[in-house]
Amino acid sequence: MVGAEPQSTPTSPGDGSGRPEVVVSISRLEVLNLLKQELAFLERGGYGGTMPWRPVSMFLDSPSCPNRLDGERTVPCPECWLFQFVPERYHTEMEPCHFIALNTQGESVHSMSRQYTPGEVESALKVWLEGEIRHLEALERGSGTDHAN
């Protein structure tokens, strides 16, 4: 979802676990910084580049994922900052971040991984990250927020 506006999002796991609603509250500036960190991870070859030593999963194998090193996946996906970019109809998917629309055609990590090479998916992810960063930087400039003080 290009141009998604970071927000506080009340969510319900919807998995019958009885866990209470989770409210993810994160500022636009925090999201901007996290997007830049994700882009830096990608550019450093964090997903293994074109010749990964093992199969990798975009977003899930990134420092962005709160469950990256947790095989039990104890942190519900709605608590992840990336969840705000997931279209609502995919909120209940096992890996909702894989359904973030990376381009105007609505292609996602999920759909692209079935028809493109890992390098092509990484390129699409990079373009999406750069676009979101530009969008949020423009919003920050437009808000008149002075971060130097």
Image (cartoon, rainbow, N blue to C red):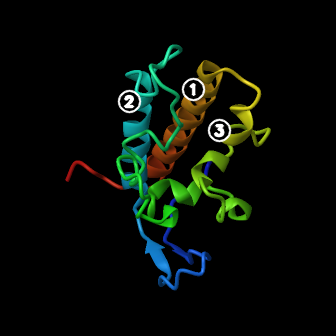
**Foreground tag (1 vs 2):** 1
The residue that label 2 is drawn on is: 40
In the image, residue 67 above or below residue 110: below
**Residue drawn 47% across the image and 66% down it:** 76
* Outermost residue to the left: 149
Is 49 rendered above or below residue 124?
above
Q: CA distance from mark 1 to mark 2?
A: 12 Å
Which sits earlier in the primary sequence, circle 1 or circle 3? 3
On the image, the x and y values in percent for residue 15 come to: 60, 75
Q: Are marks 1 and 3 in contact (CB under 8 Å)?
A: no
Asked if residue 148 shows in the view, the reply is yes
Q: Is residue 30 above or below residue 61?
A: below
Label 3, residues with CA under 10 Å away: few <14, some 14-19, many ≥20: many
Q: Give the mark nearest the N terminus, 3 or 2.
A: 2
What amino acid is found at the position of numbered circle 3 in the picture?
Val
Residue 96 image offset from top left, x and y in percent: 61, 55
Identify residue for label 1: 122
In this rendering, would 106 be left or right of 14?
A: right
